[in-house]
Amino acid sequence: MPETASLQKRKTGRKRRRAGFDTAFGRAMLQVVAVVAFFAVWEIGVRAGWISAFLVGSPSGIFSVGYKMILSGELVSDTWYTLFEAILGFIIGTIAGSLLGLALWYSVFVARLVEPFIVAINSVPKIALAPIVVLWFGTGLVSKVALSVSLTAIVALIAAYQAAKDADVDLQSLLISMGADKHQVFFKAVVPSTLPSIIATFRINVGFGLVGAVVGEFISSQRGLGHLIYTASSFYDLNTVWVGLFTLMVMGFVLYYVIDMIERVSLPWKQSSTTHQVQV
């Protein structure tokens, strides 16, 4: 019996420690520790000669380069330029794609007619369109935004169209039986039921918006993080390359959590439902 009681106490202690980390603050602390440990091992490996600083750079070198670029204003300028391109492409592409996808609900005939073309367009790697987009729209801001739109619009279109097809049929039938016309069914049943899927697509399209902007800058640009990374890699300046990559990661995290906040505000019932499921 004493051994059983001792074992039970140890199990209880472990559960309490896990519960302490299973909070927003606890998870954040573990993530910070993991990042610090990663960079510490990297720096130690470079200083000990186990890792080539020429091939992979070093955390101290990355920090030094990043600090200088922040002071000079170069990193801030390039970041804002890429961020503006990505957000503009994301907004235009997501709105246009979502509206087109929802509009296909109105006609089954048109939807079936254009579906093979949508699949064909989606199967083409959008990066392959970059040279054509630059040729059509030039080397300025418009070509980067157009490339971001090409990546985000097709994803939003497919997601919205599929969500509209899967909208609650029983609710639509009920509204029709009560005398609702097609427009009322669309706005009362189809649109509300597709909102979770459309907003979930925002998370994916944020990344695609950044990809489009950066790829456009790779091909032809004098500004932006893509231009920074491409130029630095041409000179084998790995520390500057990592500065650009880590800045893109931070941008992606920030945009992701902005979308998360939008979801919490626009779909509060989904958050409460998720919390209830976790508690149960």
Image (spheres, rainbow, N blue to C red):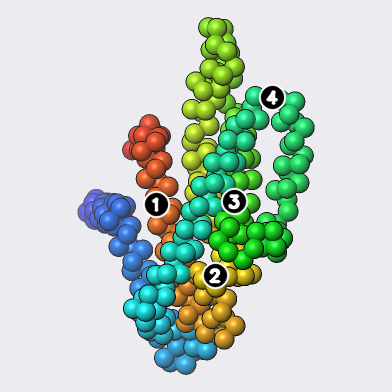
The first of marks 1 and 2 along the sequence is 2
Residue 220 percent location from the top left of the image: 62, 70
**Pointer 1: what residue?**
257
Check disc 4 and give the amino acid type.
Answer: Ser
Q: How many circles with numbers are drawn on the protein?
A: 4
- Quadrant in which the C terminus is drawn: top left
Q: What residue is drawn where x is 51% and y is 47%? A: 91
Element class at badge 2? helix
Q: Nearer the viewer, mark 3 or mark 1?
A: 3
The first of marks 4 and 3 along the sequence is 4
Q: What residue is drawn where x is 65% and y is 24%? A: 106
Element class at badge 3? helix
Element class at badge 4? loop
**Pointer 3: what residue?**
149
Query: Relative to residue 231, is residue 265 drawn left or right?
Result: left
Q: CA distance from mark 3 to mark 1?
A: 21 Å
Do we see residue 38 in this rendering?
no
Q: CA distance from mark 4 to mark 3?
A: 25 Å
Q: What residue is drawn where x is 42% and y is 75%? A: 74
Check disc 3 and give the amino acid type.
Answer: Val
